[in-house]
Image: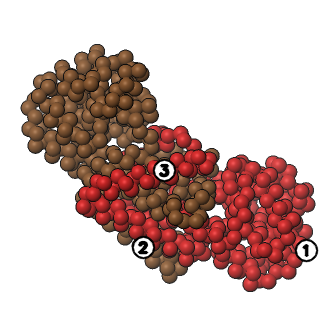
Chain colours: A red, B brown
Amino acid sequence: MFNKISIIGCGLIGSSILRAVEEKKLATKISAYDKSSKVIDYLKKNFSVEICRNISDVVKDSDLIVIASPLSSYKEILLSIHTSLKENVILTDTGSAKKEVNKIISNLNLKNVNWIASHPIAGTEYSGPEAGFASLFKNRWCIISADKKVAEDKIKSLENFWSKLGSKTKRMTFEDHDYVLSLTSHLPHAVAYSIVRSAINKEDKFKDDVIQYSAGGLRDFTRIAASDPLMWKDIFIDNSENILKVLDNYSKSLNEIKDAIKIKDSKKLLEIFSSTKKARKEIIEAGQDTDKPGFGRK
Amino acid sequence: MFNKISIIGCGLIGSSILRAVEEKKLATKISAYDKSSKVIDYLKKNFSVEICRNISDVVKDSDLIVIASPLSSYKEILLSIHTSLKENVILTDTGSAKKEVNKIISNLNLKNVNWIASHPIAGTEYSGPEAGFASLFKNRWCIISADKKVAEDKIKSLENFWSKLGSKTKRMTFEDHDYVLSLTSHLPHAVAYSIVRSAINKEDKFKDDVIQYSAGGLRDFTRIAASDPLMWKDIFIDNSENILKVLDNYSKSLNEIKDAIKIKDSKKLLEIFSSTKKARKEIIEAGQDTDKPGFGRK
C-alpha cells in the first residue's frame, strides 16, 4: 500500500497507529519519532520498526506522514521537516481541531505536499505510548478534511489507510469539522473539567464523601476530565471561537434549568428532562453507544 | 429476618428490591403495590409474591415497608397507609433527596413507626419494572438517615437488610445527605440535561453529524440525561436549595475556563485540566469506578 509510513509523536494515538500499521503490515518500512527520550526508549524496547532520534530522518522517503502530537507542536515540526519531504507525500495528522492548523500549513506554502487532515474520533482517558492498542480505531469514525485542490486519488488513498485500521471515514470541511466537534467533544470536555473542579474541592469538608458516593453521575465526568491536559489546552485555544459560542448556548440552557428550579416549575423541568431522553435513543440508533445500562456498573 | 416486607412502587428500583428479596428469601411474606395497572399486570405475570391493587392492603401486618416511588407521591401514599400500619413497623424509602421528605413525615406525626430513610446509590438510565434486576444493589453504597430518637436495633435491622441485598451502608444526617448528593449526582444530572439540550438541537443543520460523531464525549452525557424525567423533576424541586448553591459554584468554575479561553491563557488552562486529573485517580482508588479505558468502547 505505502512504501514507507512515518509517525511523528507516539503517545496514545500515535503508538496505536504504529501498532496497527505494524500488525497489519501496511508499509514496507515504518519509521517513528517522538521528541521525548523516554518515549523513544519505550519504542525501541517494544517495536521492531525504525525509531529515529532526528525528526528530519523520520520523514525521509516517506509516502505517508502522520503527525500525532499536540496541536501546539505542529508549527515547529513542520518547520523541521519541510525540506526533507518526498515529492508528492501525503501529510496528515490526528488533531481534534483543524481550522488554525490548516492556516499554519497553508502559510508555509509547501510544494508538492498533499496535506489532508485526519481526525480519528477515538481515544481513552489515558495517555502515553503504553496506553495505546492496535484496535483503538476499530469501528470508530475518522473525519477527513482537505482543500478542493488536493488530488482525489490521494484522499482516497488516505481514506483507504484508515479503513485498513478499522475506521469508517467521513469527509468534512475544516470549518464544519471544528463546529461539529466543538459540540460533540470540546463542550463536553469543558463542562466535565468545570464540574469536577467545582464538585471535588479540597476545601470542602465533604470531599471524601463526594468521592465515595460518586457513582450517581459524577464519576462519568471524572473519566472525561482525566484526558490529557496538554492536548486539551491546545484544542481549547485552537478552536476557541466555536467553543466560546457553544459555551454561551450551553449557559443559556443551564440558566433555563436554574430558573425552573428557582420557581419550582414542575412542568418546565419535566419538559426539559423529557426532551433529552430522545437524544439518547438517537445516539443508540446511530450505533454510537450500546444500550447496556451504564449506571449499575461496578 | 422479617415476617412481611412490603414494596410500594415497582419501577426500576422497587422491582429490583422485589427480585432480590424474593431470590434471597428475606421474608416469609412479600407484598407489592404500584399505582399503575400496567405495572400490576407485569408483576402478576412475573412474580409469585402477593400483588395488591389496594395500597392499604399491601402494608397490613408488614414489618418493613419500602417506598420506591417518586418523591412527589410520598405524601399521598403516607396519608393512604398511615392508619393501616403495624405497630413498630420500619418505614423506609429509596429516594434521592431527604430533607423535605423528612419534614413531611415528621409533620404527619406517625405513632409507633420507625421512619429510617434509605438511599441506595444504584440505578441505570432505564425505568420501569422490566428494567430491574436482583443484583442492582451489589457492591453499591446505601445511605441511611434517621432521627436520633429512632431505636438503634431498628436501624441495624434495616442496615442488615441492605447488606443482604449486597450493599455497603453508611449513616448520614438528612442534611448532609442532600448536600453530598447535590454534588455527586444532582449537579451532574443538571449539567448533563443542559448539555444534551443545547448540543442536540433540532434546528441545527449539523444535528445528524452531532449524533453521528458523539463518541468524543457527548454520548456519555446522553446516558445520564436519559434518566427518568419524573423522578428527576421531583429531586430538583425537593433539593432545590443545595442544587442552586452548587450550580452557582459550578458556573464560577465554568466562567474561569471561559475567561481563560477568551484570552488564550495556556498556563491557566493547563493548570485547570491538570487539577481534575487527580480527582479521577481518587475515585478509582475509592473503588467507585474501574480503571478500564472508557472512551474506546464501542
Q: Residue at x 30, y 35 (%)?
A: B68
The residue beneath circle 2 is B256
Residue A202 position in % (x across, y down): 36, 61
Circle 2 crowding by C-alpha within 10 Å: few under 14, some 14–19, many from 20: some
Q: Is residue A58 above or below residue A281?
A: below
Q: Residue at x 75, y 50 (%)?
A: A166
Q: Is residue B136 above or below residue B21?
A: below
Q: Are marks 3 and 2 on the same chain?
A: no
Question: Disc 1 vs disc 3: which is toward the camera?
Answer: 3
Q: Is residue A152 above or below residue B66?
A: below
Q: SS class of the residue under badge 3? A: helix
Residue contact at pointers 1 and 3, CB within 8 angstroms: no
The residue beneath circle 3 is A278
| Alpha carbons under labels 1 and 3: distance apart | 50 Å
Circle 1 crowding by C-alpha within 10 Å: few under 14, some 14–19, many from 20: few
Tag 2: residue type? Answer: Glu
Tag 1: residue type? Answer: Glu
Q: How many marks?
A: 3
| Alpha carbons under labels 1 and 2: distance apart | 46 Å
Does residue B79 appear left or right of residue B286 in this picture? left
Residue A47 position in % (x across, y down): 79, 53
Decide which of tag 1 and tag 3 comes sooner along the chain: 1
Question: Disc 3 vs disc 2: which is toward the camera?
Answer: 3
Q: Which mark is residue A87?
A: 1
Name the chain letter of the residue that bears numbered label 2.
Answer: B
Q: Is residue B254 above or below residue A129?
A: below
Q: Specify whether residue A218 is in view.
A: no
Residue B125 position in % (x across, y down): 45, 43
